[in-house]
Image (cartoon, coloured by chain):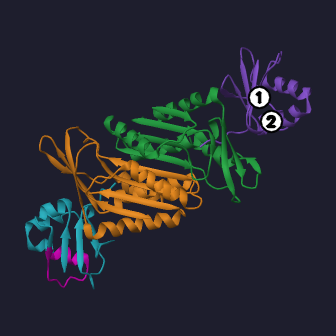
Chain colours: A purple, B cyan, C orange, D green
Amino acid sequence: MDIVYFAWVRERIGLPRETVETEAVTVADLVTELVAREERYAAAFADLSALRVALDQELSEFDAPLAGVREVAFFPPMTGG
Amino acid sequence: MDIVYFAWVRERIGLPRETVETEAVTVADLVTELVAREERYAAAFADLSALRVALDQELSEFDAPLAGVREVAFFPPMTGG
Amino acid sequence: MQVRVQQERFDLGAESEAFAAGAAAAAGAGGIVTFTGVVRDAEGGGLAAMEIEHYPAMTQKALEQIASEAMQRWSLADALVIHRYGRLVPGEKIMMVAAAARHRKDAFEAAEFLMDYLKSRAPFWKKEILHSGAAGWVQAKTSDEDALERW
Amino acid sequence: MQVRVQQERFDLGAESEAFAAGAAAAAGAGGIVTFTGVVRDAEGGGLAAMEIEHYPAMTQKALEQIASEAMQRWSLADALVIHRYGRLVPGEKIMMVAAAARHRKDAFEAAEFLMDYLKSRAPFWKKEILHSGAAGWVQAKTSDEDALERW
């Protein structure tokens, strides 16, 4: 599964994209796995209310299932316009 | 005193501008004088709620005094934009 | 702030660019809203032309009052009003307003305010001339008068 | 309906003219509203540049969804969204939206809807780079999120 990061999430984690092997059932499960890995992930995911997630380029929620999903994106609230 | 007419008021009365001698105290008095003159004025002023008035190029009301006024304009509700 | 009453066509592109450039140079204008009105066909179709009459001695002054009030109420960086008169054919631009402000909400509100006031308080009258030769004055809409109550 | 995500500058004048001409040709478009966003100085001043990051695989699709929804909700004659990414300096245009409709209220509402959704639902992130060298991500505003509740 591909994971992509944007803005300060990308900066804290230190990379824009990575591929992970995971059995996580929901986005929240995936976050728990990532946070357990290294301090920089814990820092990036410290406050989930400050984060947004997209599954295969569609905005989603942290309790959404990951079945069939190919790309997960984490980023701060968007500031377009 | 100069009186100017616009849109269908001008068309009904048949002229765009005229100069009148009047002792009318208010706009309504002036209208009464005009209506008494000829049928085309009576036709133009038949329904005052369908008319607007400007005194010296400022929107005003039919009960406004005419003292010091040089130009009175009568016209239908505006349709700019 | 600029107000222009004219018979000639105006160039929407050039006006928009010039207004945006001027507003951007002014400190803090982050958003620019424009509204452009175009002659559309009559309700039942068959419009040949629209004749716009105005009150020359009053028009410029009335538009400047409306624009000045918008400048003050929304602390605009700039405002623009262009309104044509004379004979226009369907598809021609009748008028435009533009408002520039620090925040988008102010620019939107000011542009809507300008439009609502232009519709009912600027001394213009429109007459529709049909291909059939029939002609009629456009009637003011109650909804346009009601729109003023918002401000 | 047209949606463009690009690094290059766009010509507001040419875009406005082309959009208005197309919308006027489409039956019944009497009003055209545009909004243009310009890079303004940072809150405390001293902005050197604004860097706009986006999510290439998602951006076009997200903007098209937003524009499609506007087209349907307001029966628009046409809609346009242009949004830039990359490094911009103060005074440069970031983006524009345009909406054309039979009645001005629809064109205004659709343009505001497009802006409100672009602000909070299009995958762009802005970073301010100051002359001092300091840099910081622009924070989403609660007021921008709240603006969505109107729709």
- Element assignment for label 2: helix
- Using a 10 Å C-alpha cutoff, classify the residue at mark 1 as few (fewer than 14 neighbours), some (14 to 19) or many (20 or more): some
A40 with respect to C102 (left or right): right
D144 with respect to C61 (left or right): right
- Element assignment for label 1: loop
Where residue A43 appears, as percent x and y from the top left, is 87, 37
Of the residues shown, which amino acid type is indicated by label 1?
A: Phe
Q: Nearer the viewer, residue C31 or B70?
A: C31
D63 with respect to C45 (left or right): right
Q: Is the Cβ of the residue at disc 2 closer than 8 Å to that at disc 1?
A: yes
Q: Quadrant of the C terminus of chain B?
A: bottom left
Q: Quadrant of the N terminus of chain B?
A: bottom left
Q: Residue at x 13, y 68 (%)?
A: B41
- Using a 10 Å C-alpha cutoff, classify the residue at mark 2 as few (fewer than 14 neighbours), some (14 to 19) or many (20 or more): few
Where residue C90 appears, as percent x and y from the top left, is 25, 43
Give the extent of the magenta segment.
B18-33
Q: Which residue is mark 1?
A: A62
Where residue D50 appears, as percent x and y from the top left, is 66, 47
| Above or below for B47 versus D36 | below
Callout 2: chain: A
Of the residues shown, which amino acid type is indicated by label 2?
A: Leu
Nearer-N-terminus badge (2/1): 2
Do tags 2 and 1 sit on the same chain? yes
Count of numbered circles in the view:
2
Q: Residue at x 91, y 33 (%)?
A: A39
Gap between marks 2 and 1 measured at Cα: 9 Å
C67 with respect to B4 (left or right): right
The reply to whether residue C112 is visible in this rendering is: no
Quadrant assignment, res B13: bottom left
Q: Which residue is mark 2?
A: A48
